[in-house]
């Protein structure tokens, strides 16, 4: 995709870096030792069983950087798109507001998410610790500390993963697995592939050198060094030679062939305060508490979150 944002034939911005937000990074050695299939092949009914097997092995199934609200929103977006693509599209489209038709699908996605996040001992240090942890530390919990078995994180987690092995490529190859988020729909082989990205924007006060920098970065071979050296970089420009780091190579073009854009960004942010981030963060907080009443607490958390999503949509509709 090569897109220029322009007005009156004047260049203002350029998409430069895309991201795949539907990846699951996992401890490959641990999965092999336990005889577990890669997360990308898990069916919805298998999640509780396989999470339990991980927990019984002495490891926490998941790491989560909940202090970064986008990680929570991305996880929810993948579950929603995996279970109901129509509901995903309905939520993001201002002109496709069908509250009665879509409420059941959104409720079901949040119930699935509650079952995963509310699983006993799902996270190292429980939900409370996850809420204070940021994205890089969640990745390190899997590959540096070994406290968790997997983390749902975009492709730009790769440089952090690499840093956990201090240049030991052999150890990294044996320890790191990455797959796409699984499909939750019965009978469907491929799961969701959600994309995001960054746009370079030329401000009104920009000097000529800034415009020249954007011109240079718009050349088809500009991203090559990022892709080859550290990974965690996907070029949105289709003129760029398709290339992937060694970690992403097995997934091939699918990491670059997403069909849906970041749910939270499509709903929209207000001055950096993304409303969906807040809704899903509160949802996770509502799941925290005494395990004895977890089912009632999860049901209440789902109802509150569904109401919040609908209020957000009502506000967008005016």
Image (cartoon, rainbow, N blue to C red):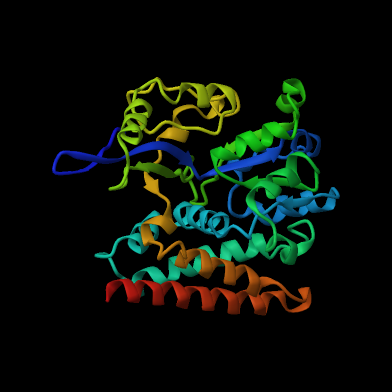
Viewer-proximal residue, 122 or 111? Answer: 122
Viewer-proximal residue, 295 or 133? Answer: 133
In this rendering, does residue 120 appear at all? Answer: no
Tell me what residue is drawn at x 77 percent, y 25 percent: 171
> Where 87 sits versus 222, above or below?
below
Q: Is residue 181 left or right of residue 34?
A: left
Tally of numbered discs: 0
Tell me what residue is drawn at x 46 percent, y 32 percent: 234
Residue 149 on image: x %, y %:
74, 45
> Where 14 sits versus 269, above or below?
above
Q: Is residue 306 left or right of residue 64?
A: left
Give the quarter of the figure containing the C terminus. bottom left
Residue 245 on image: x %, y %:
56, 25
Residue farthest right in this picture:
58
Viewer-proximal residue, 181 or 206? Answer: 206
Q: Residue 12: name its quadrant.
A: top left
Give the quarter of the figure containing the N terminus. top left
Tell me what residue is drawn at x 77 percent, y 73 percent: 291
Residue 302 on image: x %, y %:
55, 73
In this rendering, does residue 153 appear at all? Answer: yes
Viewer-proximal residue, 153 or 39? Answer: 153
Residue 130 on image: x %, y %:
70, 60
Tell me what residue is drawn at x 44 percent, y 28 percent: 253
């Amino acid at each position: 995709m090569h897109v220029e944002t322009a007005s009156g034939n004047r260049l203002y911005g350029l998409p430069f870096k895309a991201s795949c937000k539907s990846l699951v990074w996992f401890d490959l050695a641990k999965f092999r030792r336990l005889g577990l299939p890669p997360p990308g092949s898990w069916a919805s009914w298998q999640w509780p069983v396989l999470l339990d097997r991980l927990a019984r092995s002495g490891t926490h199934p998941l790491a989560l950087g909940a202090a970064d609200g986008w990680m929570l929103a991305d996880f929810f977006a993948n579950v929603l798109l995996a279970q109901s693509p129509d509901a995903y599209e309905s939520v993001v489209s201002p002109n496709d507001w069908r509250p009665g038709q879509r409420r059941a699908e959104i409720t079901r996605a949040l119930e699935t998410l509650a079952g995963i996040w509310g699983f006993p001992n799902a996270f190292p240090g429980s939900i409370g610790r996850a809420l204070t942890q940021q994205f890089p530390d969640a990745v390190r919990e899997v590959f540096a500390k070994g406290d968790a078995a997997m983390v749902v994180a975009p492709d730009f987690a790769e440089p952090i993963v690499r840093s956990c092995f201090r240049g030991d490529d052999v150890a990294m190859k044996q320890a790191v697995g990455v797959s796409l988020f699984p499909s939750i729909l019965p009978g469907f082989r491929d799961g969701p592939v959600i994309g995001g990205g960054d746009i370079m924007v030329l401000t009104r006060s920009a000097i000529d050198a800034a415009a020249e920098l954007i011109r240079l970065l718009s050349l088809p071979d500009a991203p090559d060094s990022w892709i080859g050296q550290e990974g965690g970089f996907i070029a949105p420009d289709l003129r760029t030679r398709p290339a992937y780091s060694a970690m992403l190579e097995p997934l091939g073009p699918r990491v670059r062939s997403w069909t849906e854009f970041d749910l939270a960004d499509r709903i929209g942010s207000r001055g950096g305060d993304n409303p969906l981030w807040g809704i899903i963060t509160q949802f996770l907080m509502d799941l925290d508490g005494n395990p004895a009443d977890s089912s009632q607490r999860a049901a209440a958390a789902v109802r509150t979150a569904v109401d919040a999503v609908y209020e957000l949509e009502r506000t967008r509709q005016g």
